[in-house]
Image (cartoon, grey):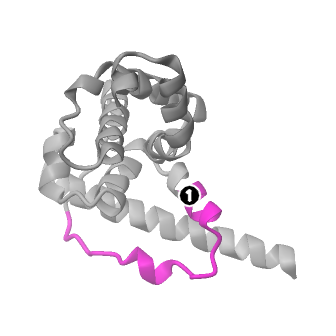
Amino acid sequence: MQKLSSGDPVAQRSLYEAYKAVLFGICRRYIGDYHEAEDVFVMAMTKIFKSLDQYSGDGSFEGWMKRIVVNESLMHLRSKKMHFQEIEHQLVPIDIEEELDASMDIAYIIEAINELPDGYRTVFNLYEVEGYKHKEIADELGISINTSKSQLILAKKKLREYLKKKDKDLFRKQA
């Protein structure tokens, strides 16, 4: 850690190589465009290297880095002025896990998540992947709790539609 803090390029390269897949994966979960995700990843890594002296040692170092990457991703999305859609009618929860076939290739699921509009994808990731509560999501994104809930429901609905279509397309190809 001391070599990292002093700016040792070998230590920085080692850290980069050890965590690039995990941290870039987080960027890709939030940002649909591959090249934009790369830009955000570079900004996040730069921030990590510049902020090493702020890591207090409490909690895992990887968790600290992930938090920076999530925050950078959210700042990028905010700068693009994500559009959120609130549904006025009764919210009906959707359990996406019921829809996911255990044998379904994870690549299809990731592809489906990447197809979601920015707002849906962001709320879905924060809630389902990062474990945020709707109040935390609302505070983080500057939206209402109901908007967070409706974005999650709409994201799950779109995911279900996409995965069902993909499943039918695969079935046709196999026949």
Q: Position of residue 35 (x, y in %)?
A: 59, 28
The reply to whether residue 165 is visible in this rendering is: yes
Q: Residue at x 52, y 28 (%)?
A: 36
Residue 70, placed above or below residue 159: above
Which quadrant holds residue 130?
bottom left
Dot 1, how many residues are within 10 Å of its Cα: few (below 14), some (14-19), or many (20+)?
few
Is residue 28 rendered to the left or right of residue 56?
right
Closest to the observer, 29 or 23:
23
Name the quadrant of the C terminus: bottom right
Q: Residue furthest right?
A: 175
Q: Residue at label 1?
A: 110
Q: Residue at x 18, y 60 (%)?
A: 133
The reply to whether residue 32 is visible in this rendering is: no
- The verdict on residue 104 being magenta is yes
Is residue 164 rendered to the left or right of residue 4?
right
Q: Position of residue 155 (x, y in %)?
A: 40, 59
In the rendered structure, which segment of residues is drawn in magenta?
89-112
Q: Position of residue 49 (x, y in %)?
A: 37, 23
Q: Residue at x 36, y 59 (%)?
A: 129
Q: Residue furthest front?
A: 2
Secondary structure under tag 1 reads helix
Is residue 170 rendered to the left or right of residue 167?
right
Q: Position of residue 33 (x, y in %)?
A: 55, 35
Q: Which residue type does callout 1 highlight?
A: Ile
Which quadrant holds residue 1?
top left
Q: Residue at x 34, y 75 (%)?
A: 94
